[in-house]
Image (spheres, helix red, strand yellow):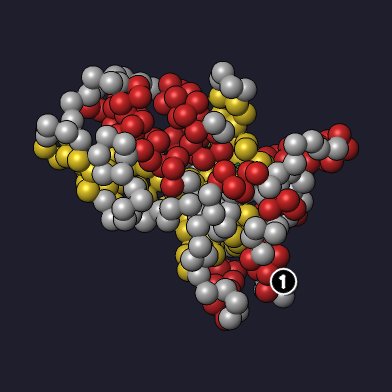
Amino acid sequence: MKIIAPATSANLGPGFDSLGIALNSYLVVEVLEPLENWLVDHEFGSNVANDRNNLVVRTALSINPELSPRHLKVTSTIPLARGLGSSSSAIVAGLLLANELGQMNLDQTMLLQLATRLEGHPDNVAPAVLGDFVAATYDEDWCDALQLPYPKLSFIAYIPNVELRTKESREALPEKFAYRKAVHGASVGNVYVAAVAKQDIDVIGRMMVKDEFHEGYRRKLVPDLDRIRTVLQHTAHVGTYLSGAGPTVMTVATQAQTAAVVAALKAEPQLDGEVRVMSIDRLG
Ligand code: HSE
């Protein structure tokens, strides 16, 4: 049996803790033979547990403590702590694992509720469960999440060689926020979602770079965001945003624009991380 959960990119510009998209990099969990104790083979190194403390197993046991131990093999093309939803993919995979092994018959709505409760915000787990583009809200009790088809665009990830923990990146955010800024930020997010519904790429691009809620505060932690916006000033693209809590910076482009964007990013000597062209995963 194989369990698969996709990478995700949250916020998409103005949709802090609310908008996200599923992308075509994956965490794959292969379920092997029963064992005395849980054993997780993986290639993440010694900082990631290989026993029942592994996030996939921990998540599965949190909703079904009776599960019998198995040998699991985990492979992934989602880099850790880079703003591409690696922990959400592990949480969603853990829930799917418990659902399959424990024959729990959890439907998508229940998976979404459980995943959001565990993650604390819905913008990675919701697209990991539902696929495609998702607008979601969570009030500590219930997550409402609606999926819309996003226009067929490329997501060009600039993935730096350094990790940035979500916790650290969230600590850069202010405790309080001016009323007028909040109203403007919400209006930008609303128009963004309407633009997705209308498949209006121009408006998506304009709204993508008008975030009020987080990018400005995280600038110091992720200088590559401003750097890439400068690098791409004269290269046609839809927009650029900080993927989740960073440090990955995402550039959205049409298929026709993609090669030039990749070339411009690769030509900039200060950008020595990975440039990965990703596409939307609509989960079938
Ligand atoms: N919306 C979250 C943040 C995503 O920006 O902190 C983190 O994965």
Quadrant of the image for the C terminus? top left
Instruction: Please rate how many residues cluster around mark 1, counting C-alpha atoms within 10 Å: few if below 14, some from 14 to 19, many from 20.
Output: few
Left or right, 211 with respect to 165, comes to right
The amino acid on which the numbered mark 1 sits, given as a three-letter code, is: Thr
Identify the residue at image location x=70%, y=65%. 226
Identify the residue at image location x=54%, y=31%. 120
Q: Say if residue 228 shows up in the picture.
A: yes
Task: Name the element at disc 1.
Answer: helix
Q: State whether residue 66 is above or below residue 214.
A: above
Q: Say if residue 284 shows up in the picture.
A: no
Displayed quadrant of residue 233: bottom right
Q: Position of residue 71 (x, y in %)?
A: 17, 39
Left or right, 148 with respect to 2, comes to right
Residue under numbered circle 1: 230
Pick the front one: 148 or 240: 240
Identify the residue at image location x=56%, y=33%. 121
Q: Position of residue 97 (x, y in %)?
A: 28, 32
Quadrant for ligand 1 reads top right
Identify the residue at image location x=67%, y=64%. 223
Pick the front one: 203 or 112: 112
Left or right, 227 with respect to 257, comes to right
